[in-house]
Image (cartoon, coloured by chain):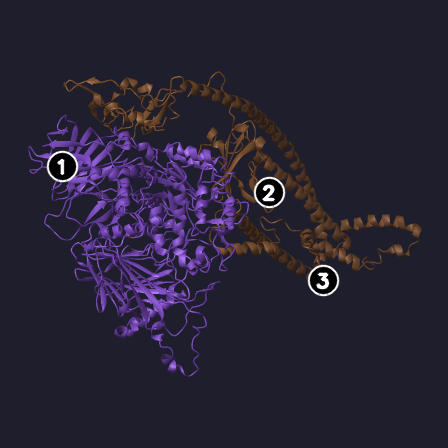
């Protein structure tokens, strides 16, 4: 269907007010940040000095101390600038080949923050016992890997760490000599040498560190910006490190930024951006859809990729960090500048994108399997204003037969923005309301933010205050007071372990020992953790002063980027302990850090209802997946603004193919729930919602894979085809899990078709029309671009030949109500006439699966040699995948487990075989009874010209989803 | 907890055991019969839309064959199907197929037929009874309400009579007043023609000219002053709205500063703080207070300058204002004076009539008086004409479907103010007039809009049309649109407001009841659904 011309009119009439509302004055540029300025000045001096530049840091060869039984060693490092200062280096080789490099100041005036990795890592990494370091005259070396092709060299003077594979340099630390750990000093020592006027000539002689550190003590002891002054009691303590990927032209990762997936450069003549990428969790109002500014979350993980190799570094730092990216002819140079903390860098050897993600998630943990309902459609708005409003939204969706799994309440449910406390005027019956939602097996998700209204009658604030578990001001005592939704507020300090039990008791639905608990909730309520950057309306950069004090005396600057993760972490923990037996918690967080994937879902924050934001949201979710945090999405429709119906429809298509699918809108936005749209939009939205639900088996299986291997749910082109250079920069299409589904959401106005890039010489089928895009006739090494229909009601969605896609196509009101619906299998035959696929199922909300209570099937299809000629045969089968391994839970798996029994009556009601080139003679089940079928004439999977595929529909073979079976198609 | 365990325990083809007419509404049962095919392939059946012929076995076999979903009336196999539950003991009902065999017992199917046997109990007896009770209660409510409504209609008819009666009186009054105006106009004309010349001369006086300049200046100042007052008020309204309505959600401390600044400037008590004592400002010596300006400036500007000029002449020229000839009294013995005055009066009026003695100060003030009388009479006439106009309009609104309803049932409620106290605010809707939000703890109240229309989505005159009233063009939100209100009414025995909500920023929704919506119950004919 072509969109009527009225769309274009509507577009033209849109107010121009939403152009740029990003308040750049609220956030620092590098030039406004003292340590970033110092870091960039350092790299500028190195650039100017060119070949004469030499890192002042070196390893004392006599200090190298190998661990007796592990692949680790320590050594002392000196800086030629400050020979009296000691630095300690610690290198470890993990069992999986990851190299960890740590450096700290030893015996300094103060202690650098060294706990970032403790929060990020899921468990202490296992150090290899098989690999050994060899100490040479100029370096320490280790060679390892299955083919003994990986080598790590730690050079002494200057200090330089190199990871090589097959003799080719992959990652080099301090290649550019920008390593600099500003040691602690006292303010008096640091007073600049007074230079009499007119004697500037002697400066160089007097200050023999200026060639490296510069002439000025730039913002060492105090820093003012806008109306704030940062007292910097510890003085300068920044960390500069250059990381070079000499042979990789593409780098990805370091979410969260609104940029292309393959990161544009920030230095050099053709720089994509002028400022470095920044990681400093920030509540950015109406952020720009293309910018290196920091956003809500920070994952300091960077992938580097070429056609032969993928490597990565994970820089476990929790303070404000700026990253410059520059390109050389063959590779990429990056420069990381952090405000504080030790050097703690992990080198991930790859060699494939999937290996990198596995190595990274082995360090920081994989995302747990979420509750099944969380993959459904989430209906949100700031705000549903009353319990009757919630009921009415539910009713209207039901009246339209539009599926939905969760209704959300934003901050206005709470009285005076005192989270947990219901505003009884509008929500007089909260538990009844929640139960009305749960009656249809849906869930409510309610917001709880980390700032507490300073009101002694508010039990939540009172408890935290009495426990002394609130963030302290720079004095180190009392309670920091800032401004947020409730007005004057204080922030819970989740670095303080005393807060953890408190948080657990808050979420109990029955009061324990007279402690305050949220008894007006249920054991199924999900929690939305927002504003956890933390957002402070009257603070510097809309956040906390950096000299605020957390538990253990650490300054806020040391832990800023970790802060948001701990909030979601403790909420997740509290929800886990809410019920017995536990149910899988659902927590949505806005702020995140490395490791946050262990605690729920994220979204891309307060986006704007524009096409640019729709497009960038996809890239941001892809980038987050590369950062191990694949359970994400962006607000469908855009948080700010009033998108026209065309944009709303396209955005639902984006949402239907996002791991997290939530529609949300700002309080000033008009209501835009799907039932409010006129036809034909309303029906299109219904179809899209139903498509999402039909594909839930695909999504759930992809989540299962992510929870075991870390591999993201949405897979960018280069992850699926690491050797196809043409796909390295593609970030507007992606594969869903390992299902073979390839999606390219439309993010432009008025589109009627879309170009999809195909890397592999394989046939692809249009999901909806069965139109086939055959593999190229001749063997070619490069990909091809095909044009697919993309009118408003169409989603460019292809199935890769060789895939079997399980769906459940009966519309229901919520995902739980589909639990006993039959399956449809789409068998998309490859050019060779074969296909594979799988499906993972479990009870969707408990932890029975860890006791083997699940079903994991593998489907296969194969065409006998001779193909579809007379007597030819096509076999389609199902077998138990769990017994073949691949899951952590297999050890206790029993094919006749409780869950499997509960779904043993669920059948496959239909098989749609794509690419069947000739009319079958008969179709039989398990070599016995024949079943009805229908064949629509079309081309076979081995065809070489585009056209409608031949489709065989097998009618109700009545085979169980949990049982082994084989269907035989005889030609 | 999960009823489908029952399902799951059964063998796979369980659902094919469903009867062929399961889920078929009575009106279609006759269509669910097999056709015996002549070609010998067994019994067949044709989809209700005629699009396809399928095997009779394929009906209700839990596999969707027909594009219209008609082959699966009793299962969930077709996405576009519908399911009929008989609900014996209650009323039959139709649900979408998506609700069949989903493990939940649908309230619409009290007989439990939407799920496999044994999953949902048959509750139709109780449900039916309960339903009939509710319907009876509703019928009673409507009956009582419709009686009140009838009284509203009676009121409208009385009102019509009253207005019509008033029309006659008003028309007569207008006729009388018109005559009076005519008469006075004649007098004023004559008086003016006598005095015009002399007046022109006197108007040349520098004092008069200066007075005119003063007048213009004062008038201009007043105009400016009013504009400033209006701007200040508008600004104050904006800031008041900001102060009470702002959500500190724009992360904008500038807004907070503005609110605090305004509170200081306007001397407002901070929200949540106890109100401070009002301070009275002392008036400066000799200068007028704002109230006095308001009160007296207009009076001052409305003074007739010509009269003033003449008054002035009178005062200044008192001794010599009249000609010696006529001022004979000074030379006459006291006893002669009264007869003389009487004579002079006659003489003067005689002279005036002859046009011999014209332009005297007395004649000018006479003209002035005549002019004043004419203007008063004209004003009265205008008022009466307006009254007539209004009465005409009221009369035409009375039985106008887009006004007070086809039966005039809403006239009684015209201007009736209903209130709902929600703690922080009281919401007031004066029907057909204006709705307001009034803070209970002090501060200014906001208009939520003035009555603009009935439910625009319904046809005027239909019952649906009168269930919604729109009030628009209320006070502007500081960061949004002008406030507006949708009043949603249902039949009830009282005129009351029930709930207030703000589904979108500054767009309010209030629900309430009114007897005006209680249509008479047709007795003897119960609602049969």
Residue A761, percent from left and from top: 14, 48
Residue under pointer 1: A916
Using a 10 Å C-alpha cutoff, classify the residue at mark 1 as few (fewer than 14 neighbours), some (14 to 19) or many (20 or more).
Answer: many
Q: Position of residue A568 (x, y in %)?
A: 39, 47
Asked if labels 2 and 1 share a chain, the reply is: no
- Going from N to C along the chain, the mark reached first, 3 or 2, is 3
Give the chain letter at badge 3: B
Q: Nearer the viewer, mark 3 or mark 2?
A: 2
Give the labeled residue for mark 3. Answer: B207
Look at 37% across and 82% down and name the residue there: A201
Question: Residue B475's x, y, as percent?
Answer: 53, 46
* Residue receiving disc 2: B440
Whether marks 3 and 2 lie on the same chain: yes
Specify the chain shown as purple.
A
Task: Name the residue at the top extreme.
Answer: B524
Categorize mark 3 by other alpha carbons within 10 Å: few (<14), some (14-19), many (20+). Answer: few
Nearer to me, A360 or A47: A360
Q: Residue A805, relative to residue A456: is it above or below?
A: above
Query: In the picture shown, does residue B226 fall above or below B45?
Result: below
Q: Residues within 10 Å of mark 2 (few under 14, many from 20)?
A: some
Q: Image point 18% across, 56% down: which residue? A: A308
Furthest residue toward front? A68
């Amino acid at each position: 269907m072509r969109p009527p011309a009225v769309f274009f009119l509507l577009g033209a009439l849109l107010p121009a007010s939403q152009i740029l509302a990003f308040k750049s004055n609220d956030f620092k540029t590098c030039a406004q940040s003292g340590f970033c300025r110092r870091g960039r000045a350092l790299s500028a001096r190195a650039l100017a000095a060119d070949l004469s530049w030499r890192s002042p840091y070196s390893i004392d060869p006599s200090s190298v101390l190998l661990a007796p039984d592990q692949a680790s060693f320590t050594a002392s490092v000196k800086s030629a600038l400050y020979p009296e200062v000691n630095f300690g280096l610690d290198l470890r080789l993990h069992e999986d080949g990851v190299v960890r490099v740590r450096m700290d100041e030893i015996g300094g005036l103060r202690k650098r923050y060294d706990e970032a990795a403790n929060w990020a890592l899921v468990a202490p990494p296992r150090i290899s016992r098989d690999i050994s370091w060899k100490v040479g005259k100029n370096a320490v070396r280790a060679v390892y890997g299955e083919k003994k092709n990986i080598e790590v060299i730690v050079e002494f003077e200057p200090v330089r760490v190199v990871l090589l594979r097959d003799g080719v340099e992959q990652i080099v630390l301090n290649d550019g000599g920008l390593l600099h750990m500003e040691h602690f000093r006292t303010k008096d020592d640091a007073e600049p040498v007074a230079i009499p006027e007119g004697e500037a000539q002697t400066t160089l002689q007097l200050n023999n560190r200026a060639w490296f550190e510069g002439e000025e003590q730039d913002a060492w002891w105090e820093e003012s910006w806008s109306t704030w002054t940062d007292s910097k009691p510890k003085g300068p303590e920044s960390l500069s490190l250059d990381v070079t990927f000499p042979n990789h032209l593409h780098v990805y990762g370091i979410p969260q930024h609104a940029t292309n997936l393959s990161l544009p450069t920030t230095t050099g003549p053709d720089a994509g951006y002028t400022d470095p990428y920044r990681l400093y969790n920030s509540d950015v109002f109406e952020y720009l859809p293309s910018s290196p500014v920091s956003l809500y979350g920070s994952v300091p993980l960077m992938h580097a990729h070429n056609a032969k190799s993928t490597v990565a570094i994970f820089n476990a730092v929790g303070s404000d960090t700026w990253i410059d990216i520059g390109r050389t002819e063959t590779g990429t140079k990056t420069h990381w500048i952090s405000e504080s903390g030790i050097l703690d860098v992990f080198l991930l050897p790859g060699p494939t994108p999937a290996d990198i993600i596995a190595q990274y998630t082995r360090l920081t943990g994989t995302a747990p399997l979420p509750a099944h309902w969380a993959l459904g459609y989430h209906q949100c708005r700031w705000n549903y204003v009353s319990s009757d409003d919630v009921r009415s939204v539910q009713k209207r969706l039901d009246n339209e037969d539009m599926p939905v799994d969760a209704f959300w309440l934003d901050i206005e449910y709470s009285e005076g923005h005192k989270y947990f406390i219901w505003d009884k005027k509008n929500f007089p019956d909260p538990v009844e309301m929640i139960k009305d939602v749960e009656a249809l097996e849906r869930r409510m998700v309610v917001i709880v933010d980390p700032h507490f209204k300073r009101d002694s009658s508010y039990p939540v604030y009172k408890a935290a205050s009495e426990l002394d578990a609130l963030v302290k001001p720079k004095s180190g005592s009392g309670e920091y007071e800032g401004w947020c939704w409730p007005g004057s507020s204080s922030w819970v300090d989740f670095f303080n372990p005393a807060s953890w039990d408190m948080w657990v008791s808050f979420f109990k639905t029955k009061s324990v020992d007279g402690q305050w608990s949220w008894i007006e909730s249920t054991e199924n309520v999900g929690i939305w953790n927002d504003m956890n950057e933390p957002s402070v309306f009257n603070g510097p950069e809309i956040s906390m002063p950096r000299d605020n004090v957390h538990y253990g005396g650490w300054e806020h600057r040391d832990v800023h980027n970790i802060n948001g993760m701990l909030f979601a972490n403790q909420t997740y923990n509290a929800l886990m302990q809410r019920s017995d037996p536990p149910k899988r918690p659902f927590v949505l967080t806005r702020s995140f850090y490395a490791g946050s994937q262990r605690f729920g879902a994220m979204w891309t924050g307060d986006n704007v209802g524009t096409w640019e934001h729709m497009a960038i949201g996809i890239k941001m979710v892809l980038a987050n997946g590369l950062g191990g945090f694949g359970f994400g999405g962006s607000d469908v429709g855009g948080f700010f603004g009033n998108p026209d119906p065309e944009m709303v429809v396209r955005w639902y298509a984006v949402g239907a193919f996002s791991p997290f699918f939530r529609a949300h809108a700002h309080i000033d936005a008009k209501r835009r729930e799907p039932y409010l749209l006129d036809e034909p939009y309303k029906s299109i939205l219904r179809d899209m919602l139903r498509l999402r639900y039909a594909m839930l088996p695909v999504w759930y299986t992809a989540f299962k894979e992510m929870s075991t291997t870390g591999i993201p749910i949405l897979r960018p082109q280069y992850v699926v085809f690491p050797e196809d250079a043409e796909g390295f920069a593609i970030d507007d299409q992606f594969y869903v899990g390992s299902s073979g589904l390839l999606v390219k959401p439309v993010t432009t106005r008025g589109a009627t078709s879309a170009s999809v890039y195909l890397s592999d010489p394989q046939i692809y089928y249009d999901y909806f029309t069965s139109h086939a895009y055959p593999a190229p006739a001749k063997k070619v090494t490069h990909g091809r671009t095909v044009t697919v229909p993309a009118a408003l009601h169409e989603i460019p969605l292809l199935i890769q030949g060789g895939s079997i896609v399980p769906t459940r196509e009966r519309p229901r009101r919520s995902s739980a109500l589909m639990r006993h619906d039959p399956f449809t299998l789409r068998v998309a035959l490859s050019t060779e006439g074969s296909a594979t696929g799988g499906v993972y199922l479990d009870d969707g909300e408990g932890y029975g699966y860890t006791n083997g209570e699940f079903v994991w099937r593998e489907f296969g299809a194969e065409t006998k040699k001779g193909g579809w000629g007379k007597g030819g045969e096509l076999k389609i089968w199902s077998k138990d995948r769990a017994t073949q391994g691949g899951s952590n839970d297999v050890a206790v798996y029993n094919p006749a487990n409780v869950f499997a029994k509960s779904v043993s009556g669920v059948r496959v009601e239909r098989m749609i075989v794509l690419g069947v080139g000739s009319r079958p003679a008969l179709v039989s089940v398990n070599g016995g009874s024949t079943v009805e079928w229908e064949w629509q004439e079309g081309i076979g999977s081995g065809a070489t010209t585009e056209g409608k595929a031949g489709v065989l529909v097998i009618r109700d073979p009545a085979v169980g989803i949990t049982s082994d079976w084989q269907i035989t198609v005889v030609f | 907890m999960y009823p489908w365990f029952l399902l799951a325990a059964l063998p796979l083809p369980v659902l094919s055991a469903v009867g062929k007419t399961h889920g078929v509404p009575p009106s279609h049962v006759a269509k669910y019969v097999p056709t015996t095919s002549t070609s010998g392939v067994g019994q067949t059946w044709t989809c209700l839309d005629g699009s396809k012929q399928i095997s009779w076995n394929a009906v209700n076999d839990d596999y969707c064959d027909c594009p219209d979903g008609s082959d699966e009336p009793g299962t969930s196999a077709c996405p576009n199907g519908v399911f009929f539950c008989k609900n014996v003991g209650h009323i039959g009902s139709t649900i979408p197929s998506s609700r069949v065999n989903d493990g939940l017992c649908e309230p619409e199917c009290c007989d439990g037929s939407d799920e496999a046997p044994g999953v949902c109990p048959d509750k139709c007896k109780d449900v039916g009874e309960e339903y009939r009770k509710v319907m009876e209660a509703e019928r009673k409510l409507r009956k009582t309400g419709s009686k009140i409504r009838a009284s509203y209609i009676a009121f409208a008819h009385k009102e019509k009579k009253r207005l019509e009666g008033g029309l006659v009186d008003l028309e007569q009054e207008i006729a009388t007043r018109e005559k009076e105006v005519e008469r006075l106009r004649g007098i004023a004309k004559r008086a003016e023609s006598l005095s015009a010349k002399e007046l022109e001369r006197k108007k040349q006086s520098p004092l008069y000219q200066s007075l005119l300049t003063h007048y213009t200046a004062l008038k201009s100042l007043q105009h400016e002053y009013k504009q400033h007052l209006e701007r200040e008020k508008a600004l104050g309204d904006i800031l008041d709205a900001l102060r009470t309505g702002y959500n500190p959600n724009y992360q904008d401390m500038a807004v907070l500063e503005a609110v605090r600044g305004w509170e200081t400037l306007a001397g407002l008590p901070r929200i949540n703080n106890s109100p401070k004592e009002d301070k009275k400002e002392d008036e400066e010596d000799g200068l007028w207070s704002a109230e006095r300006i308001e009160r007296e400036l207009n009076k001052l500007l409305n003074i007739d300058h010509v009269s003033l000029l003449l008054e002035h002449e009178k005062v200044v020229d008192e001794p010599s204002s009249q000609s010696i000839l006529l001022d004979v009294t000074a030379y006459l013995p006291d006893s002669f004076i009264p007869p003389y005055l009487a004579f002079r009066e006659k003489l003067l009026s005689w002279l005036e009539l002859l046009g011999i003695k014209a332009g005297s100060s007395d004649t000018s003030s006479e003209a002035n008086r005549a002019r004043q009388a004419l203007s008063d009479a004209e004003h009265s006439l205008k008022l009466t004409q307006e009254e007539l106009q209004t009465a005409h309009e009221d009369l035409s609104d009375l039985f106008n479907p887009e006004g007070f309803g086809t039966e005039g049932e809403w006239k009684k409620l015209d201007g009736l103010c209903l209130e709902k106290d929600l703690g922080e605010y009281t919401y007031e809707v004066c029907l057909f007039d204006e709705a307001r939000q009034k803070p209970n703890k002090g501060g200014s109240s906001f208009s939520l809009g003035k009555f603009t229309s009935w439910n625009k989505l319904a046809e005027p005159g239909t019952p649906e049309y009168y269930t919604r009233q729109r009030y628009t063009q209320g006070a502007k939100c500081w960061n949004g649109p002008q406030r507006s209100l949708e009043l949603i009414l249902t039949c009830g025995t009282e005129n009351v407001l029930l709930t207030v909500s703000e589904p979108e920023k500054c767009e309010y929704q209030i629900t309430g009841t009114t007897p005006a919506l209680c249509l008479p119950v047709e007795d003897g004919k119960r609602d049969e659904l």
